[in-house]
Image (cartoon, rainbow, N blue to C red):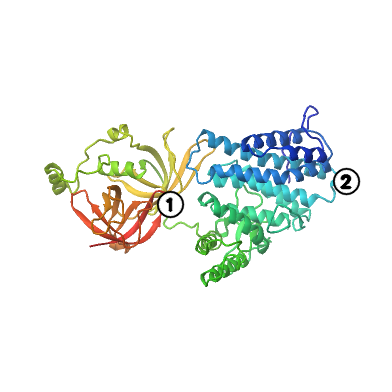
Amino acid sequence: MLTLPLEPTDDRAAPIFKDAVGCTQWLGQLQLTNLQQAHNLLLSQIKEINRYPMQGLERLKILELLRETVGYIQDDFAKKLIAKPLPLNESEHAVFNAIVNLWQAMVQGYQRGLQAYLAGDKQLAKHGALLCQRCLSYCGLVIFEHLRTGYEFDIKLWQHLHELYAFAEDKGLHQIDVPDPLSTQQTRSSCSNSYVKTLLACFARPAELTRWQLQQLDRWLSLWSNNVTIEKSLNASKNDAQPLAADLSSTQGLQRVEWLKHTGSMRYLAMVPLSKLLRVKTILLQQGQTSRQVGLGEQFDSGACIDFLVFLHQCWCENFHKRTGERKPIAQHAELCYRPEGIYAHLSGKPFKQPDKNAKIDTLTRKQIETFGHSLKEAKNHELVEMGYPLENWKMDNESIMGARLTRADRMGGRLNYKQLIALRPSDAQSFMLGTTAWANVSLHGELQIGIRYLPGLPEPVLVKGSTIHQTAPDKFAPAFFLPPLPALKTPASLILPRDWFLADRVIEVQFQTGTTANVQLGFSVERGMDYERVSFNIL
């Protein structure tokens, strides 16, 4: 059953304009040079229009006039939040709230029109599909904004999105094409297209995407959503991409079919056509065709397009969300540090500093290495924290051999980003492990939560700099980490270098904790994160 949570209109509402003619004049005078001021004006006027009692058709005309300006300002405003670490700072959070509030104001405006339609407004009798499509589209944008920024939202948003689609389907409005003049890809859309677009966009892990990828995702899904049908029965094939499922009675988005109990409220997205489309475009790009020739837009870098198409295929068609290794709930805490200098300090027990060229490893340290296999820490953890190398307390929610999910126990702490290098020491372990953030989000209660993917092997802090043999790297030392080989996993040794240090065949000098040095030639990049790069090497 469709519920429209709207407050009653109020005769005391006083919008600057009260009809479509007045709206057109006001938009013509709106100054867009001051983005924040224009955003505030738009939000306040749409809220006043939503409170103001007026005929449904006039309200619809006003909202349609506002859409282009709202979309332009929101897109510009959202640039401030792309790839920001979490949690957002105060000014960033204000921007995020403003964006969400404006999308919600548009939802409420169209819901007013849908409310009048349901009440039998004859002037809106032919606009039911349009009203439903707009409600679905803007409700989806509220959800997507939270997901791409990394902030948890009220699960009732998913419930409302599903209710809107169920209503459109029940009334036979879901496949009716309506004008969509803002889309440069398709001039018409439908409730089904908008619903599919939101579901797939939210299932593509938007918090991990760059601004360019987010733009392409929007453009491509405007075209591709027509290739995905919504079915009431499950039709799975053995070797092709499996359907994705949405439960119209649930408070979740898309899910894998094997995770769900099949009921009458289930709807299935047939993914085989989209899987074939993605694979064909990838092959054509690999064969030398341009992005424009394969229908992906103007002359974009083919390599970037290929990588993104492969990523989307993994998300939608390959069960990429399935974890390797069983995750088990655990009840323990862990200490966590981040940034290469901080990780080096806590792994080595001393702050990073440029070594004295003439200094040799001291006798005490050498004896400690001979006796214990490693140097005893020169500074306690609390002393390193006082020096500016934070060590935070986190709760481990669950763990597998591949990684863990954690929630920060400290009320205050630093900001973390996607693919950021971290070091983690569980309460029952003696040593730190290296890992990288697989995802990060902020809960409704303001807690920072992260997923960690472990890097293989027990890390050893080392120092690296350009070698006298091949001076193509910085001539000053930088903190880095050596990961030993793991024969059981057939994993060779690797180095964790500062980002942008890697160049194939570059020769660098590595200084180990024992004081020994070696010249190594870099091989290939294994993976790259926000502040690190893991690379192969050969000792010369």
The residue labelled by disc 2 is 122
Using the rendered image of the protein, determine whether residue 239 is visible from the camera's viewpoint. Answer: no
Using the rendered image of the protein, determine whether residue 530 is visible from the camera's viewpoint. Answer: yes
Residue 327, labelled with which disc?
1
Q: Is 465 in front, or is 414?
A: 465
In the image, residue 254 lies at what x, y percent? 59, 54
Element marked by disc 2: helix
Say few, some or many: other residues with alpha carbon within 10 Å of mark 2 (under 14 / 14 to 19 / 20 or more).
Answer: few
In the image, residue 367 lies at what x, y percent? 12, 45
Say what amino acid the circle numbered 1 marks.
Arg
Of all residues shown, which one is farthest toward the right? 122
Q: Is 163 in front, or is 433?
A: 433
Q: How far apart are marks 1 and 2 (CA)?
A: 56 Å
Q: Is 194 in front, or is 517?
A: 517
Residue at image location 43% in from the left, 52% down from the top: 327
In the image, residue 316 lies at what x, y percent? 56, 60
Element marked by disc 1: loop
